[in-house]
């Protein structure tokens, strides 16, 4: 397994797209964070007593999850697209080891990059709030360290989900479309359904997981860490399906 991990790490770090996407992650994340400070007074006025400076500063996770999800998918789909997957599986016939190594590396990179981004945007956001005279938070406040850590864990799960979808779809476009549907489209259209159906969306994994990125309680998600745990279980289930598909389907 150590040799497989080493081989997959060499592949991952030698791809220009890996570093381009990580650079884009920070450029886009920090850029959005700075631009959002222009209307922080409006956001504070709209929130009122529900103002949560921690959650507001980390809303860039919405874009970050797409970038890291695509990165996770590319860990697998780039090899299917070039035919290198045949070579990989010839060198390592134990297919589960190949996918496990890819999943571990994608999760590790997503966790480190995502956690670093969440910490950076939190600090930038609080600095901007202070400059604009809006209530701010600090890392020493109750619940703040947990919320910032939840941001990194959330993005790590999204990276794993990208690997799983890439393995099942075997095409970057298909994996991206499915990922967008899971994290954007389905939660976005929840409001158009009748109230009795909307109750189902309370259990949608990404909605419950994202609730952990704040310190002000959300009445729809009273136990946000349970929501994040449910999201992790959902990602694990999709990854388990990916292991089955990779083992049974021809390359």
Image (cartoon, helix red, strand yellow):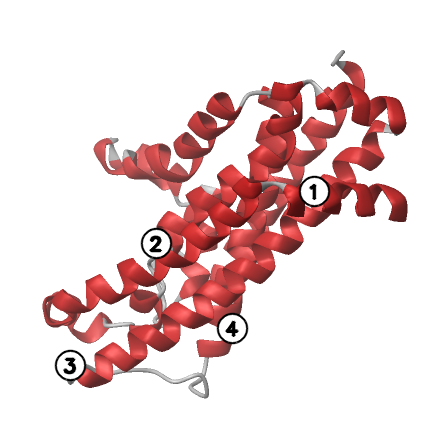
Disc 3 from disc 1: Cα separation: 42 Å
Query: In the image, which is nearer the foreground, mark 1 or mark 4?
Result: 1
Pick the residue in front: 54 or 78.
78
Q: SS for tag 4?
A: helix
Element marked by disc 2 = helix
Name the N-terminal-most of marks 3 and 1: 1
What residue is drawn where x is 48% and y is 46%?
Answer: 21
Query: Which callout, 1 or 4, points at the residue further toward the start of the chain?
Result: 1
State the CA–CA distance, disc 2 to disc 1: 25 Å
Q: Which mark is residue 132?
A: 3
Q: Quadrant where the C terminus lies? A: top right
Q: Earlier in the sequence, mark 2 or mark 4?
A: 2
Q: Residues within 10 Å of mark 4 (few under 14, many from 20)?
A: some
Report the disc number at residue 146. 4
The residue labelled by disc 1 is 103
Tell me if I can see residue 1 in this picture: no
Classify 226 as above or below 230.
below
Q: Residues within 10 Å of mark 3 (few under 14, many from 20)?
A: some
């Amino acid at each position: 397994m150590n040799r497989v991990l080493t081989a997959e790490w060499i592949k991952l770090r030698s791809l220009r797209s890996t570093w381009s996407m990580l650079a884009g992650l920070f450029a886009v994340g920090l850029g959005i964070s700075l631009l959002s400070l222009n209307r922080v007074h409006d956001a504070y006025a709209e929130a009122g007593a529900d103002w949560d400076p921690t959650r507001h500063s980390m809303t860039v996770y919405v874009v970050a999850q797409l970038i890291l999800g695509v990165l996770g998918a590319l860990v697998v789909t780039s090899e299917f697209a070039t035919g290198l997957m045949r070579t990989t599986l010839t060198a390592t016939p134990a297919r589960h080891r190949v996918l496990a190594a890819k999943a571990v590396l994608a999760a590790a990179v997503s966790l480190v990059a995502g956690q670093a981004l969440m910490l950076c945007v939190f600090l930038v956001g609080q600095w901007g709030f202070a400059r604009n005279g809006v209530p701010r938070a600090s890392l020493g406040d109750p619940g703040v360290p947990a919320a910032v850590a939840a941001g990194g864990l959330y993005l790590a799960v999204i990276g794993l989900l990208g690997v799983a979808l890439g393995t099942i779809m075997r095409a970057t476009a298909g994996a991206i479309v499915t990922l967008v549907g899971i994290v954007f489209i389905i939660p976005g259209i929840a409001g158009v359904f009748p109230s009795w159906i909307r109750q189902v969306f309370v259990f949608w994994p990404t909605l419950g997981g994202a609730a952990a990125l704040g310190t002000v309680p959300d009445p729809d998600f009273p136990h946000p860490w349970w929501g994040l745990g449910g999201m992790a279980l959902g990602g694990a289930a999709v990854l388990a399906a990916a292991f089955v598909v990779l083992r049974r389907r021809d390359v």
